Amino acid sequence: MRLLSLNLGRAVAVPYTDQPQGLTGIDKRPVDHPVLVTAPGPKGTGGSGLAGDAVCDLRHHGGDDQAVYAVAREDLDAWQRELGRPLVNGSFGENLTTEGLDVSDALIGERWQIGTELVLEVTGGRIPCRTFQGHMGERGWVRRFTQKGATGAYLRVIVPGEIRAGDAIRVVHRPGHGVTARMEFRATTTERDLLPRLLDAGEALHPEALAQARKYVARHGG
């Protein structure tokens, strides 16, 4: 398992986002230099965990529990075949393009060490938005992405550190609850009856997903 590509984005103006200034950093490109990864601060004030990476809409993106976004190269390859066009590393706006790691089925609370220092923890899957659809230029993209459920994973920073493309990835902790990023995505989007299952992951869940699960159980039971 390795970090195939490390991708950063800069703020650019586009017509397909509802960010107040019309800016997005979703168009991330591979870099060949080391990048420091740290916890960026709470959502709403903190952006990306990667130095030099732009997160523009702090209402919905960035912050400590979405500090880093990872996508498996294998999932990009599957989408390439389905869409009939190439998808370079970073095409989904991911910071980390991995090889040999099933990112969407990583467990909530699973921890990865990348390189010699950095440790990240999986918090949940990525929910597609209007900006993602505009960036991809595919009709019905939000629906298609949702149906496939290969969401990639958001991660928080447990131990900061510097990484670069080619670094080894090691899974250093794997919880026993069975709640994956893919399951979290399904529960918070199209299969809300799964929400009680998310509680098995506890505080490792993204706080917004944990709040949804608790609210559902309070109303409907577990």
Image (tube, rainbow, N blue to C red):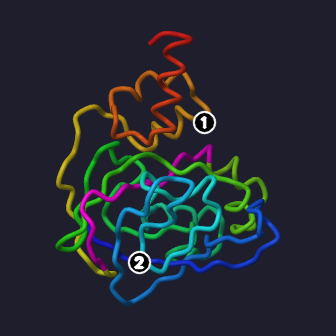
Task: Look at the image and give the residue range highlighted in magenta.
Answer: 146-163
Q: Which mark is residue 6?
A: 2
**Residue 122 placement (x, y as % from top left):** 35, 50
Label at residue 78: none
User: Left or right: 44 with respect to 4?
Assistant: right
> Residue at point 60% right, 36% down?
189
Q: Which of the pair 119/90 is nearer the observer?
A: 119
Residue 201 against residue 164 in the figure, above or below: above
Give yes or no for contact between labels 2 and 1 (Cβ–Cβ under 8 Å). no
Which numbered tag is attached to residue 189?
1
Label 2 packing within 10 angstroms: few (<14), some (14-19), many (20+) = many
Callout 1: few (<14), some (14-19), or many (20+) C-alpha neighbours within 10 Å? few
Q: Nearer the viewer, residue 65 or 141?
A: 65
Q: Position of residue 165 (x, y in %)?
A: 34, 81
Residue 181, percent from left and from top: 42, 44
In this picture, is 154 found above or below 52? above
From mark 2 to mark 1, how far is it between C-alphas? Answer: 29 Å
Query: What amino acid type is highlighted by mark number 1?
Result: Thr
Measuring 75% from the left and 65% from the top, which residue is drawn there?
134
Q: Amino acid at mark 2?
A: Leu
Q: Secondary structure at mark 1?
A: loop
Horizontal side of 30 relative to 13 (left or right) equals: left
